[in-house]
Amino acid sequence: MSGNIFKFKDARLLTQWVRYLLYAQVFVALLAISSNYMEYQLLMDYQSGAYSSEEQAIADGDENDRRQLGVAGLYFVVFIVSGIMILKWIYRANFNARQLGATDMNFTPGWSIGYFFIPIFCIWKPYQAMNEIWQASHDPENWSLSGFNSSISLWWLLWIVSNALGQVVYRLTDRAEELQDFINLNMLAQVSEVSTILLAFATLSVINTIYRAQTEALARGEQQAYQGAQQVVVG
């Protein structure tokens, strides 16, 4: 195995933190689904005229808004922190793939995360970068001979769908005026949360698989280095 395994940076702790944060994403998404369902029930009560007191209707609406705002705040914090850690993990995975012997990779560690922030390019470049990391991690010396991986393709599809739904929900929030608009928005938000959960599990699967592949490749490289050193001693 070519490369420099002695520069390989252990990603065990980073990977563990990313796992925790992805589980936190799932928890917050489930919390949001529960809160959205409560809001849906409130909206349906408004629509059916279940309230006999305007004061109670307003009080319940205010309580709902406070709860939703709290969930949204938690949602924001968890997804910002997890997003930063996932990008850091991708950077580390690209770097380590090179240390395991992968050469002529098309994406540097920096650009493997940089393309997430560039309009238009963010639609497909991060997918290509992650697929390259997958290939280089499983077969560092012959990575370019591998094709696109279905797990990466599924992960990216869910990423596109989840982000698209999130954008739609965000834009419709400012336009909602009638009661039916808020009901439709609530239902769309529920679908968005489900896509978020699916994306979190897909990301977890990809990260675990790449981490395991790199760990195994590192072990092979260390074994080869040890055997080479033994041959030198014997010689």
Image (spheres, rainbow, N blue to C red):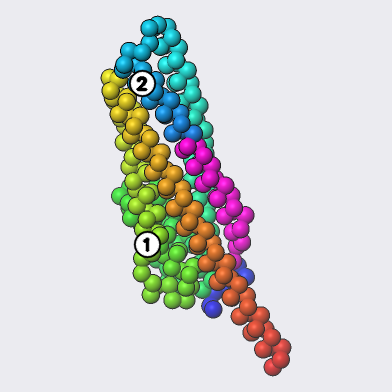
Q: Tell us which disc is closer to us: 2 or 1.
A: 2
Q: Which residue is mark 2?
A: 43
Quarter location, residue 108:
bottom left
How packed mark 2 is, by other alpha carbons closer than 10 Å (few <14, some 14-19, many 20 or more), is some
Residue 229 point in image, percent of width and height: 67, 83
Q: Amino acid at mark 2?
A: Leu
Answer whether residue 32 is visible to the viewer in this image.
yes
The magenta stretch is 8-30
Q: Secondary structure at mark 2?
A: helix
Measuring from the top left, give residue 125's x and y in whole percent. 35, 57
Task: Identify the main secondary structure in magenta.
Answer: helix
Circle on res. 150: 1
Q: Residue at x 43, y 72 (%)?
A: 143
121 or 191, nearer to the observer: 191
Q: Is residue 25 left or right of residue 52?
A: right
Residue 167 position within the rendered picture, expressed as x and y whole percent measured from the top left: 34, 37
Q: From the viewer's perspective, is residue 59 above or below residue 100? A: above
171 in the magenta segment: no
Which residue is painted at 38% across and 25% down in the image? 40
